Image (tube, grey):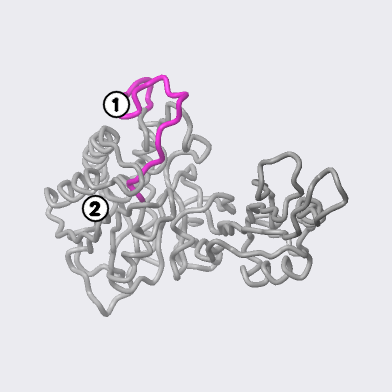
């Protein structure tokens, strides 16, 4: 097949998915409450001749000529949003188009990516003899890394060889992504009266561990993601009374891991250097990377895209296969008041995804 784009077809899809995004913005879709946007996406795909599948609030589909003997590419983005913050001056659920921008909650994160991927899927949906299958997934619960989003669906869809995850990256390629661990750390002592030399103050015991987290530097620094970053974010004792020495002091540590370390290596180093007890809340959101020699990255480079390491975490962390994170919009606009995406970014997103897939197909 040729990688020459049918501009008329692409432009028609641009118009259709821009309207879809406006409809999605108008529907509240907070994490775990995405039923109505799932319905909207499902109906849009059905209206365009796509046989859909649904698992809770996740909608997925395959290209018309799906062939189990061929490798499969996942096209994924999410349709849940965070809740709007108090600084909004515009109605977050009114899709307001003005001055080349489309305002609304979820427009940038990650509605623009989602509808652009849907357009690229539709562009190839009825094409015969593709060298790869396409599996489209509009997923739920991304904003909370929920158990009923991507992680659930991957158990039921066809085997995936690699994926493209739609998130706002200014259409540059995020080839690595930091992992996230949240640690619950506790120092224990013995309660006593503060006026007398009694007890063993757990708060004092934890101070040296706080200093260790503050000052320790892991040796391997990634050229893409920088150093491993550990930050103490919460601290509390087991009492609220001024005259009692606390017998327990707990803290929460946010750990951002580059692609050069496993979580197990990080945990072993921490445990050997602190005296407090420690327990990770989850080991699910691991750091990821995709090689510069991967077919998807090489295709992106060939169409003029640059690459970087992403400090934010996405559903990419939950995928046990190589993934490229890329999409229209700007991560800096995510979760901000009066969120918006430029109309031209959506149009460029549609064309870029089509061009990227066309290049992969002809490689």
233 over 296 or under it: above or below: above
> What is the quadrant of the N terminus in the image?
bottom left
Residue 305 lies, in percent from the top left, at 50, 50
Q: Secondary structure at mark 1?
A: loop
Residue 124 lies, in percent from the top left, at 24, 57
Front disc: 2 or 1 = 1
107 over 271 or under it: above or below: above
Determine whether label 2 and label 1 are within 8 Å by CB. Answer: no
- In this view, the residue in front, 271 or 248, is 248
Boundaries of the magenta span: 78-102
- In this view, the residue in front, 331 or 217, is 217
Give the image quarter of residue 85. Answer: top left
Crowd rating for badge 2 (residues with CA inside 10 Å; few <14, some 14–19, many 20+): some
Give the image quarter of residue 274. Answer: bottom right
Taking the magenta stretch, the answer to whether it contains residue 90 is yes
- In this view, the residue in front, 250 or 138, is 250
Give the image quarter of residue 279. Answer: bottom right
> What is the quadrant of the C terminus in the image?
bottom left
Residue farthest right in this picture: 197
Q: Is residue 168 left or right of residue 49?
A: right
Name which residue lies at 43% across and 50% down: 144
Q: What is the CA distance from the residue labelled 2 to the residue labelled 1?
A: 28 Å
Q: Is residue 122 left or right of residue 243?
A: left
101 over 285 or under it: above or below: above
Which residue is denoted by mark 2 in the rendering? Answer: 123
Taking the magenta stretch, the answer to whether it contains residue 96 is yes
Which residue is denoted by mark 1 in the rendering? Answer: 94
Q: Is residue 190 left or right of residue 55?
A: right
Residue 289 lies, in percent from the top left, at 55, 64
Crowd rating for badge 1 (residues with CA inside 10 Å; few <14, some 14–19, many 20+): some
């Amino acid at each position: 097949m040729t990688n020459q784009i049918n501009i008329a077809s692409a432009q028609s899809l641009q118009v259709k998915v821009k309207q879809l995004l406006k409809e999605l913005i108008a529907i509240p879709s907070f994490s775990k409450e995405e039923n109505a946007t799932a319905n909207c996406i499902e109906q849009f795909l059905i209206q365009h001749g796509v046989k859909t599948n649904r698992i809770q609030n996740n909608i997925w589909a395959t290209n018309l000529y799906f062939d189990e003997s061929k490798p499969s590419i996942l096209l994924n983005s999410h349709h849940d949003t965070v809740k709007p913050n108090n600084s909004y001056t515009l109605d977050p659920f009114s899709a307001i188009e003005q001055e080349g921008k489309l305002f609304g909650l979820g427009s940038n994160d990650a509605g623009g990516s989602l509808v652009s991927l849907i357009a690229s899927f539709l562009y190839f949906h009825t094409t015969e003899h593709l060298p790869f299958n396409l599996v489209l997934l509009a997923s739920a619960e991304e904003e909370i890394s929920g158990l009923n989003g991507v992680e659930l669906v991957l158990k039921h869809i066809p085997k995936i060889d690699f994926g493209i995850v739609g998130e706002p990256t200014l259409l540059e390629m995020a080839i690595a992504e930091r992992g996230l661990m949240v640690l619950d750390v506790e120092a224990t002592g013995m309660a006593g009266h503060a006026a007398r030399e009694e007890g063993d103050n757990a708060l004092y015991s934890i101070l040296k561990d706080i200093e260790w987290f503050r000052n320790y530097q892991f040796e391997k620094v990634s050229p893409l993601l920088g150093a491993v970053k550990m930050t103490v974010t919460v601290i509390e004792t087991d009492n609220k009374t001024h005259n009692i020495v606390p017998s327990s002091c707990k803290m929460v540590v946010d750990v951002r891991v580059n692609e050069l370390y496993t979580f197990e290596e990080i945990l072993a180093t921490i445990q050997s250097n602190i005296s407090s007890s420690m327990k990770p809340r989850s080991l699910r959101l691991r750091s990821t990377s995709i090689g510069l020699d991967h077919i998807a990255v090489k295709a992106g480079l060939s169409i003029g895209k640059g690459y970087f390491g992403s400090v934010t975490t996405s559903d990419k962390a939950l995928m046990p296969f190589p993934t490229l994170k890329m999409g229209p919009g700007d991560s800096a606009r995510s979760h901000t008041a009066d969120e918006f995406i430029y109309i031209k970014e959506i149009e460029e997103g549609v064309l870029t995804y089509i061009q990227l897939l066309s290049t992969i197909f002809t490689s």
